[in-house]
């Protein structure tokens, strides 16, 4: 199977298995999504979705969060991982958005990367989810699944994985492909116990077919 054939068949199968993939983070505005994505680092979406409704009620926009006291923000997010660091990131992000971008989350990667707590993955999430841009956020699920299936080979960093996926996936497909790979990794191609026998991709998966042979 050529790499082109592998990509084509992989996403044909994912289109059947996960036809309408969406982020599992709950949000109403681009700013709310940014907050949720910052909170989701090394934390489950389920936990983040428990924390954000009262947080958003108390701090509905960048202006209110920028003016918040760290102790007040911490109380709302103390059940997520690394709450002290994330408190600083959230307030720093809000202040930057207010001071540099007029209170609105910017819609380009260069400006997004100027915001505290926003790395390349988070910036790409914003571009893909909010603005449906040709961006491929690479989290642990995407990194793992792409390598196991054979979409990447010996990829050492998320950025290498991103570059390879962007090269082979049409731009208008990238936002959907991102969610499909995440959801496939979260529920089927799990880190410790992948459910290979129930996997829609087993016929094209490099790891599964290596184990069979």
Image (spheres, rainbow, N blue to C red):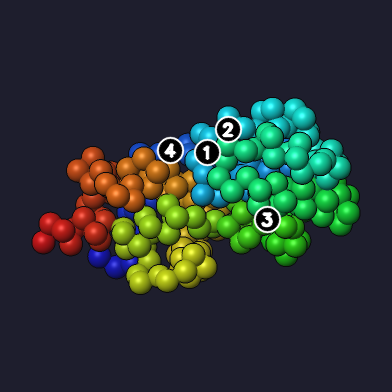
Q: Which residue is mark 1?
A: 45
Can residue 146 be seen?
Answer: yes
Q: Position of residue 181 (x, y in %)?
A: 42, 50
**Position of the N terminus by quadrant:** bottom left
Q: Position of residue 210 (x, y in %)?
A: 18, 62
Q: Is residue 61 left or right of residue 159?
A: right
3D distance between C-alphas at marks 3 and 4: 32 Å
Q: Which residue is mark 2?
A: 49
Q: Which residue is mark 4?
A: 19
Report if the CB atoms under discs 2 and 3 are less than 8 Å apart: no
Report if the CB atoms under discs 3 and 4 are less than 8 Å apart: no
Per the image, label 4 sits on a secondary structure element best described as loop
- Residue at (23, 46) in percent of width and height: 196
Q: Nearer the viewer, mark 2 or mark 4?
A: 2
3D distance between C-alphas at marks 1 and 3: 17 Å
Per the image, label 2 sits on a secondary structure element best described as helix
Q: Which residue is mark 3?
A: 117
Sooner in the amino-acid sequence: mark 1 or mark 3: 1
> In this picture, is 48 found above or below 121?
above
Q: Identify which residue, 1 or 135, lies in the foreground.
A: 135
């Amino acid at each position: 199977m050529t790499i082109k054939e592998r990509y084509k068949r992989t996403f044909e199968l994912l289109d059947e298995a996960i036809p309408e993939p969406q982020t599992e983070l709950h949000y109403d505005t681009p700013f709310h999504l940014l907050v949720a994505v910052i909170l989701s680092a090394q934390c489950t979406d389920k936990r983040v979705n428990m924390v954000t409704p009262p947080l958003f009620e108390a701090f509905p926009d960048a202006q209110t969060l920028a003016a918040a006291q760290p102790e007040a923000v911490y109380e709302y997010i103390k059940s997520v991982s690394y709450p002290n660091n994330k408190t600083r990131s959230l307030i720093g992000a809000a202040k930057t958005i207010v001071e540099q971008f007029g209170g609105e989350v910017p819609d380009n990667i260069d400006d997004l990367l100027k915001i505290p707590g926003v790395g390349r993955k988070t910036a790409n999430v914003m571009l893909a989810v909010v603005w449906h841009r040709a961006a491929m956020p690479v989290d642990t699920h995407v990194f793992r699944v792409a390598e196991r299936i054979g979409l990447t080979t010996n990829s050492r960093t998320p950025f290498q994985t991103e570059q390879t996926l962007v090269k082979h996936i049409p731009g208008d497909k990238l936002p959907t492909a991102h969610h499909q790979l995440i959801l496939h990794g979260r529920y089927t191609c799990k880190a410790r116990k992948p459910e290979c026998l129930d996997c829609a991709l087993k016929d094209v998966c490099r790891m599964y077919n290596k184990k069979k042979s």
